Image: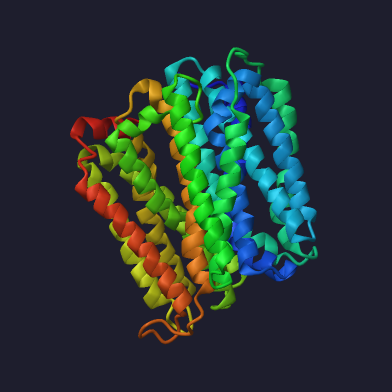
Amino acid sequence: MKLTVNEIFKTFILSIGVFLFVLDLFIINVSLPSIQHSLHLANSAAQWIIILYVIGYASLLINAGKAGEVYGRKKLYVIGMIGFTVSSFICGLSNDIYVLLAGRLLQGISSGLMVPQGIALITILFAEQQKRTMALGIYGSFAGVASVIGQLLGGILPDQNWIAESWRLIFLINLPIGILAVLATAWLIPKDLVNTAQKVLFYPMFQLFVVLILLIYPLIKGPELHWPLWSIVMLTGALLLLFLFIRKQQRIYHSGQQAMLNFSLFKNRVFNLGLLIAVAYYMVQDSYFIINSNYLQTVKNFTSTDTGIAFVYQGIGYVVASIIASRLVHKYGKKVILWGVTLMVVSLAIHLWVLDQYQLDPIHIHLLFFCYGMGCGSVLPSLMTLALRGLDESLIGVGSALYLTVQQLAICLGIAFVVGLYYNTTNPSFLGFQQLSSAYGYATLLSMGLLALVWGIVAWSNFFKRQEAETSAKN
């Protein structure tokens, strides 16, 4: 049974949402030094360009699925796509950091609105399991392709000479894609049924967003200003507010009312450990791109294009390893993940030695990034399946939403701690290395430590039994 041309086209349309979200998540990493230079931004401002995008997305994820049921998935997909297109236009024309940050926040919120609706609409459109599996495979491939294309375009576009401040192209390129996606969705995707008996909890979403901003802000500004008293007070207050928010949601849940979080998820030990692994792993994931992109361009004199091409090799390594790992995990279980994490840690150690050279050979960088990508590809595809494998089928949906939310928040924490360490360490040399800055060295050591934590949890926990591993491989 194969998909018809019309079904393939509909799948493409509904995959554009996740394509644009992932594209703009990765395209910014390589182009960030160019934006900083053009707008004369402090390092903390550059961190916020990414963090607001991620927080805006994460704040909506938990309730986005329910919002689609209440207001219509197609309607929210179109609204989200329009919002993403408009906000990309705002980012592309911004001459002020605050306008750029507002645009990035709106991009993130729009992504949080449209991405969950795309996958939900695919599930509704394809009732037959075989066709649904093929459609979801196309959807997943769009996300993978977007990560590679994003890194390449993030390098190439800022180096264009036919337009002033060509970094703006990384946002403006979204406009024709978004406009065509809106028109195609309105024309070809059928309207879905709504359930007005449900309700969406807007106020808790806003509360969570505010608490996260109050938590992340002192983590970004504190190190830069040598931790003034106000930053300590704000951080302490934010942690207290987060605790009170969770306690309130817990009371609402146990009273039988509709709560933002389903606390029965946390009774599952495997799910809890899976969330802990996600926090440690994703603190490293995005930080790696930001730090290495900045270091290659600002310290090692790589052009934006050279840096983007180097990261393409990382993406190729990821794709190759993910294909291989999906076939091996059913036989070797957690050994595949342990091997991948080990390869990532060893690659980071080699990063220190290679980047200590006065003159870098691009071939060495390409091979190094490829090996690191192989490690990522051996680990990342299995992590979510690992966390969700012990949940009851009725909890898979809410568990997935919570996992993805924690994943995005971990990226923010990684930018605050790992990238913050990189930006705010000023010692000129690192241990016995001659050409390596302490900023890069200590940030890389912290990343290695977080990955070692992932390795330890996976090794200690009996996550995989043979039959469970086979289920994970099929998923």
- Where is the N terminus found, in terms of image quarters? top left
Instruction: Give 336 or 107, whichever is nearer the viewer.
Output: 107
- Where is the C terminus found, in terms of image quarters? top left
Query: Where residue 316 sits in the image (x, y, percent)?
Result: 45, 54
Look at the image and tell me whether residue 5 can be seen.
no
Q: To which quarter of the image does residue 264 belong? A: top left
Instruction: Give 128 or 409, whichever is nearer the viewer.
Output: 409
Q: Residue at x 53, y 69 (%)?
A: 227
Query: Where residue 171 sits in the image (x, y, percent)?
Result: 71, 51
Instruction: Give 304 or 259, whichever is nearer the viewer.
Output: 259
Q: To which quarter of the image does residue 468 belong? A: top left
Q: Is residue 189 above or below residue 37?
A: above
Q: Residue at x 43, y 38 (%)?
A: 403
Query: Where residue 328 sits in the image (x, y, percent)?
Result: 26, 42
Query: Where residue 417 sits in the image (x, y, percent)?
Result: 47, 62
For residue 274, side relative to residue 43 (left or right): left
Q: Residue at x 53, y 73 (%)?
A: 424
Q: Residue at x 75, y 29 (%)?
A: 183
Colouring scheme applied when the structure was drawn:
rainbow
Q: To which quarter of the image does residue 449 belong? A: bottom left
Look at the image and tell me whether residue 63 can be seen.
yes
For residue 330, side relative to residue 58 (left or right): left
